Image: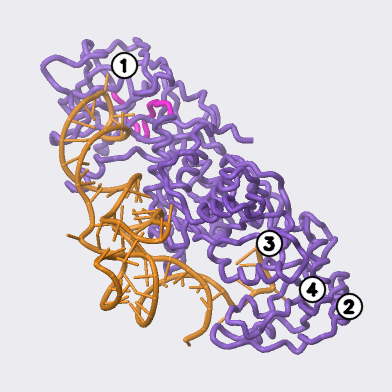
Amino acid sequence: MSTEPNSTDVEDDEKYPSNFIRTIIEKDVAAGKNSGQVVTRFPPEPNGFLHIGHAKAICLSFGMAKEFAGTTYLRFDDTNPSKESIEFADSMKEDISWLGFEWLEVRNASDYFDQLYEFAEQLIEDAKAYVDSQSADEIRAMRGSLTDAGKNSPYRDRTVAENLDLFRRMRDGEFADGEHVLRLKIDMASPNINMRDPAIYRIRHVKHHQTGDKWCIYPLYDYTHCISDSLEGITHSLCDLGFEAHRPLYDWVLDNIKVNCHPQQIEFSRLNLQYTVMSKRKLKQLVEENLVDGWDDPRLPTIAGLRRRGYTPTALRDFCRRIGVTKSDNNVELALLQSVIREDLEDTAPRVMGVVNPIKLVIENYALDKVEMLTVANHPKLESLGTRQLPFTGEAYIDREDFREEANRKYKRLVLGGEVRLRYGYVIKAEKVIKNDAGEIIEIRCTYDPDTLGKNPEGRKVRGVIHWVSASRCHPAEIRLFDPLFTVDFPDASDQDYHDLMNPGSITINQGFVEESLSEASVSERFQFEREGYFCIDSKDSRREQLVFNRVVGLRDTWAKIEQKTG
RNA sequence: UGGGGUGUCGCCAAGUUGGUAAGGCACAAGGUUUUGAUCCUUGCAUUCGUAGGUUCGAGUCCUGCCACCCCAGCCA
């Protein structure tokens, strides 16, 4: 299971505001409702991977229970066997525990199939449910429209005996898929379409991943969910706004069967995040059409993708708390997510050096085979992160971005004829460049000032400090940089097909070099490559002999802003 | 045109019984700095979708209007 450091308990921090759901629960607990107990559930359908929108729901449902000393069930809403699988359920368990939450028990809606069936027979006996033998198309046509009432099915007044007989024969497999359906008898003229005799059982001759071939009829969501909640003794059933119009049905079912627990359903708005898609359908397509590297592609907003990208559980939980919980539509900026992971990693990631776009630098007056071991801090402020040995040699790699043949004063990096400090090392001066036939710079020749280790040269100021890596004492590494998967901030809201909105430059792969110490890096670590950003080992593709790093997020880059403005 | 929701700074979001607009992100300007990072300081809604009304006083109460979102799966 998870080896993630979850030391920072962001939930305990009181500088963030409450939300309307907590307010409701606080009042209920104070009033002694449900004996003051809080029991919640997180009920995903195991038909895909969890994403950051689910993380919001997870933090809420698990978080509320935890806060009020209650418990949470992880319940797989597995009523549609043709779309679900054990593999998806397993991935969800992994993601939830990685996020840092514990469930009381894992349940499946299918655990309740027997009870659900009994309640259905009772509903039939009470003349509150009937078997409809119309086709799906006929039922749709009879449902009416948003503005017009529906019409009663010709089968609506079958006798209890007939309904019971038909329903049992449905269960026993006497009919083909779609031949009959069990419907609640509520009101075909209800202004709420969900109350117009909703179907609660359909025939599906498919094997179920939990119950095998035991059933060929499966209950539908509206009927299953509220009863499952009730059976588990859930006190507060939190779900997204999409189910708001279903609440009357949720309540109707529980009011019309014999149960002694009637949970309160409370809806909140789902998360919309810039530059990505959140619908399960689209996420699934991206994966199945091989537009991304699986469900855990680092560019995806899936929890698995964010994990592989290098996000921490702490940052994700902090993010969920910062976005709040309301009923209003929201469009959260990517900048907030990035800010949250930077804040976490700033205080936890050891600093190290890596060169993303290498260009060779030769120090002409530094002895060819000389090696000086520099003792450098792993963090500029946190001594607790210790120190490491860094080899300094006559040849190094620096980033192409850090050198220009000429530049104005604003450019604080290496310029021909100018001086700059190699971080933690000496001050060097660029003397000349060597170019290939195409005119590209392939090597920078420079000299160093031996009297500048750990102290500034006297009487002159160097332009700045740049990072580097010893050419003879480093490891080559593949370094993957990511940008948003989409070119528009809210592809889901666009009229265009999202395929046409994909960013062809969402991933760039560089062959770079990292310092020696990184060969020991493990998948659970994150590092700051100084002046570049935060990186982690790619859990899927990195090998000891061929390291692969993912950039979690870049450092805040005010220079880029200045450059952009200047032109 | 039915029903259910939502509208407070560029984004997110506090704002319990009416008393004179929190905070975070972003942005801007300074300071520190061997990461153009971090950190620190400062600035950033006379105004709460809108028009009226009640009141000494309204983001909070009342009325009308406008905008946006969700619902017509034998999906969840």
Q: Which is more N-terminal, label 3 or label 1?
A: 3
Indicate the colour of chain A: purple
Give the spatial CA distance, label 1 vs label 4: 85 Å
Q: Which residue position is annotated with label 3?
A: A262
Give the spatial CA distance, label 3 vs label 4: 17 Å
Give the residue type that dot 4 points to: Leu
Inspect the magenta stretch and tell me whether residue A352 lies in it.
yes
Q: Is disc 3 on the same chain as disc 1? A: yes
Inspect the magenta stretch and tell me whether residue A274 lies in it.
no
Chain for mark 4? A
Q: Is disc 2 on the same chain as disc 3? A: yes
Residue A233: quadrant of the picture: bottom right
Quadrant of the snapshot with the N terminus of chain A: top right
Do labels 3 and 2 touch, CB within 8 Å?
Answer: no
Q: Is residue A27 left or right of residue A399?
A: right
Q: Which is more N-terminal, label 2 or label 3?
A: 2
Check residue A394 in the rendering and tell me which mark sits there, or answer none: 1
Q: Position of residue A435 (x, y in %)?
A: 25, 32
